[in-house]
Image: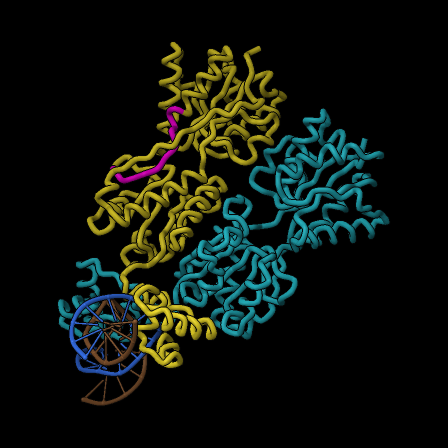
Chain colours: A cyan, B yellow, C brown, D blue
Amino acid sequence: MIKDIARLAGVSTATVSRALSHPDRVSEETRALVMGVVERHGYRVNSFARSLRKQRAGAVLALVPNLGNPFFSLIIKGIQDRLQEAGVDLLVADSHSTGGAGRSPVAHLRESRADGLISLDGSLPAATLKDLVAPDTVGKVVFACEWPLSAPLPSVRSDNREGMRLAVDHVVGLGHRRVAYLTGPAGNILTDERRAGVEAALAAQGLSLPPERVDGGDFSLEAGHAAAVRLMAMTPRPTAVICASDQLAIGLISGLSALGLSVPQDVSVMGFDDIASAPYALPPLTTIRQDRLALGRAAADLLLERLADPAATEGRVLTLPVELVLRRSTAAPA
Amino acid sequence: MIKDIARLAGVSTATVSRALSHPDRVSEETRALVMGVVERHGYRVNSFARSLRKQRAGAVLALVPNLGNPFFSLIIKGIQDRLQEAGVDLLVADSHSTGGAGRSPVAHLRESRADGLISLDGSLPAATLKDLVAPDTVGKVVFACEWPLSAPLPSVRSDNREGMRLAVDHVVGLGHRRVAYLTGPAGNILTDERRAGVEAALAAQGLSLPPERVDGGDFSLEAGHAAAVRLMAMTPRPTAVICASDQLAIGLISGLSALGLSVPQDVSVMGFDDIASAPYALPPLTTIRQDRLALGRAAADLLLERLADPAATEGRVLTLPVELVLRRSTAAPA
DNA sequence: TTGAAAGCGGTACCAG
DNA sequence: CTGGTACCGCTTTCAA
């Protein structure tokens, strides 16, 4: 194809290639000539041929725990925005729907379909993780939002502990003493971090988090809804519940409402994330905001930098600030 | 690379290639021999070289109006699930964040980065649309959820009109006579379809939808929230509001609540979509369910079929059934 | 069943 | 600044 352009322009293929990829290495007139022909024929370089020759895909893979989970959409958008600026394509895959023919996500790297990988899943199977830290892949991987405890790979994350400190200080400041915690899925790093954050902040206030005041088990609406009955059956009841996610909080409020209880009159509820619907919950949800768009962006940025210079980004961890967003779901205890 | 394997196995590269791609065209023992070496060295084919030779990318591009909008996540997941089964990769791009260097999404097709395109955006710029119906691309494109009115391209969609008929019949059956409609963004095909559906169904009941009883303007939570004041300022007030999306409905309920009004006692509210949080809204939202996962799946399926046989899928339109989901946000008028 | 070899469409080195 | 050309890694005739 480039041959056709070369012939039509009366130059060599090398010149066409240069005119397209290194405009400055070609004389003004030649460039105009070539570009004219290119334009007129709607010529586009074949990305395989180019990739094969340059040994890079021009694409990056994002690995998402569950593509159907709306929580990730903004992170993905952040990633895509940044990649697009760099002229890099974004491939997405679901880390849970096990690669059809059992293909590990790392296959994309090894088959050079992608130059790098951003994982939003910190709980990858040990085998996959092992593949990721292999010498030929370790320089191409970055984590976003979650991260694996067992390997010191570069990552971008929100300041989960600080977020929970903000949450605890807020409800304790309101006068709550019995605060319950709705946690995420076992084995998840965010679950661990946030819980540790809650415990530490509570301890700093001279309070504790007895295990029976911890419920939940995943980040979902359902889990939050289901926890309401159990939490309210306790005596004495907790007067405030901090949730590991907004979904959990919204589910909880729904469950509480089904019990005839209202927020924040009967219980205060806090979320974590500040998802789009948090301001429209009833009552509007007090929560900890993490900037998912910025997180995605930063992760893409980090990966791009890592691909360019693996050594410089070795083990780099970026912790993004979080913020307390006061709305109406918390109040002083009755 | 394949050369190394060939050398190590003591066979030709052709044989290695065959053992990998057409195991049946190679003797049992040769295959075992080759596979052994492949296994031992963790060899993976280079996808560019293969793509370059076979002239196909093994990837498909999904074009999303706004990657950050959680509404699309389930559709994307459906697409990805189906593609994965077929061993095809999924690239995603945002149709609104105009391709960095102004690259049209069609560039992916022309540069053979993707074999096909699934657009979730029915309102593509005229120029893009023109590119899509060009002879060399028209056989590679399919629409999902939305579709362009000006070009008869294959598409998968929900039965929007029937959905609105269900909604209208439900509220009218409850005894409502003054029903308002919260509509989507102007120029959007779903906006048009759904509104037409509402009008037709209302007409069939001997009722009408005067323009002043139409509000909204996009599918968002914000728009729903903002509409509450205006809707409630009307005299006489509408007793039921049908919304073009669940987001709109949830925003509306929030706005209503800020006004001291409650649903469904003061007003009945219906949504459309049945998003994950609909059952957890306060009150749980009565809505029209569209199966976004199935929709994505079907779209991927259709594209795969179209790539295999463009003629057979010419202008094909798949309309997926929708369903009324009764919850608590609707009741007989006071 | 297997091997030799011709590309697939570009890129970049090396001369000129 | 431009052209000739080897080569990126794999697939697929064509012959043997």
Judging depth in this view, the residue of A204 and A131 nearest the camera is A131
Q: Quadrant of residue B16?
A: bottom left
B259 left or right of B36?
A: right
A318 vs A206, left or right, is left
Vertical comparison of B70 with A158: above or below:
above
Residue A212: x percent and y percent?
A: 80, 43
Give residue B209's quadrant in the image: top left
| Magenta span includes B159 | yes
Quarter where residue A334 is shown: top right
Residue B236 in view, yes or no = no
Q: Which residue lies furthest to the right in this view?
A: A206
- What's drawn in magenta, residue-wise? B152-162
Horizontal side of A34 relative to A135 (left or right) equals: left
Picture coordinates of residue B112, whole percent (x, y)? 29, 58
Is residue A238 something one can see in this rendering? yes
Residue at x-position 44% and y-position 63%: A108
Q: Is residue A165 above or below residue B148?
A: below
| Placement of the N terminus of chain A among the 4 image quadrants | bottom left
Q: Residue at x 53, y 74 (%)?
A: A135
Residue B297: x percent and y percent?
40, 42
The residue closer to the viewer here, B251 or A184, is A184
- On whether residue B113 falls in the magenta region, the answer is no
Name the residue furthest front: B28
Foreground residue among B51 and B65: B51
Residue B174 sits above or below residue B290 on the image: above
**Nearest the camera: B306 or B246?**
B306
In the rendering, at what x and y percent does residue A136 appear? 50, 73
In the shown orientation, is residue A318 left or right of residue B5? right
Residue at image position (72%, 24%) is A260
User: Which residue lies at the image location 57% right of the left edge and 37% below the top edge?
Assistant: A277
